[in-house]
Amino acid sequence: LIKLVEENEKIEIFKSAEILSIEGYVGNFKSKILSENMEKEIEHGVVVVATGALEYEPTEYMYGKDGRIITQLELEQLLAEDKINPKNVVMIQCVGSRGEKVPYCSRICCTTAIKNALQIKEREPDAKVYVLYRDIRTYGFREDFYDKALEKGITFLRYDVDSKPRVEVASGRLKVTVKEPLIDEKISFNPDFVVLSVAQVPDPNNEDLSKSLKVPLSKDGFFLEAHMKLRPVDFATEGVFLCGSAHSPKFIDESISQAEAVVSRA
């Protein structure tokens, strides 16, 4: 896909670019950008904001202190490159989400965790995968993944927000301890990897871009559409459109739907 875009004569790409200013109105915008240490001015008819979201960098659960404690994105990359074949994995949900720092649910975390758990089970059917969760939220038809995970023997254990899992290293081995609320007892695991399902957070540059475009942000720092139902990909500013995770955390198919809607509107 990258190659197709780069080879398309009708698409001009500015790499390592920074927007210096945006002026004008629908059909007649002028933007100054800094790309590869060169300042350029481009003319364009519309603006599409598709800046995406970022992965929350955890400070909890010993992340960054042990290479066996990773995020779901890092797990995906390791599995794709066939660099690991774990036999025992503990996944911890809602890391950074639904708390003081990030009050919202990041929507994609549960499905991503279950998808990765299923990949592990497909590679190694006897592998033990434990998912420690507050609430499982597999939106839409993705509930099928949850059903399949239960069929494959993936274990789901609920934890209370007041009694979060504890991760430590004991005698060189990872140790995860969690209190199971139904039996009111602590359970311990010694996994090969601890995988953190972290929040999706807005780009910190959103605030500056919103001021340049004169468009609003939500209270969570994502871009806010003109109307949820009537103008879901438009801003109040004419000629400026929105799609993808710049709006809120969402799945790829949802981002594609928004992008197609923008194409029909722009």
Image (cartoon, rainbow, N blue to C red):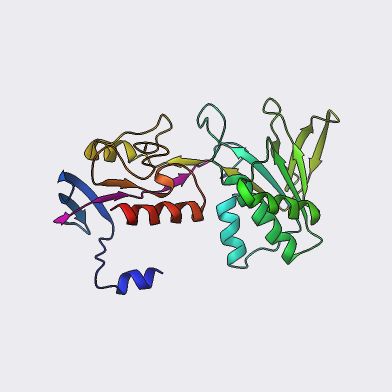
Q: What residue lies at 59% left-to-right and 45% top-to-bottom?
A: 109
Give residue 25's position: percent from left, percent from top: 16, 44
Q: Which residues are magenta?
A: 41-57
Q: What residue lies at 53% left-to-right and 33% top-to-bottom?
A: 104
Give residue 207's position: percent from left, percent from top: 31, 36
Q: Is residue 214 above or below residue 243?
A: above
Residue 17: image quadrant is bottom left
Give residue 192's position: percent from left, percent from top: 72, 53
Question: 124 or 62, which lies in front?
Answer: 124
One can see residue 229 in this view: yes
Give the total of numbered labels: 0
Left or right of 116, for residue 124: right
Give residue 204's position: percent from left, percent from top: 36, 39
Q: Is residue 127 above or below residue 204?
A: below
Q: Residue furthest front?
A: 230
Q: What residue lies at 71% left-to-right and 28% top-to-bottom?
A: 163
One can see residue 68 in this view: no
Q: Is residue 149 above or below residue 13?
A: above
The reply to whether the magenta stretch includes residue 61 is: no
Left or right of 115, for residue 235: left
Q: What residue lies at 59% left-to-right and 36% top-to-bottom?
A: 60
Residue 6: image quadrant is bottom left
Quadrant for the N terminus in the image: bottom left
Left or right of 64, for residue 211: left
The reply to whether the magenta stretch includes residue 46 is: yes
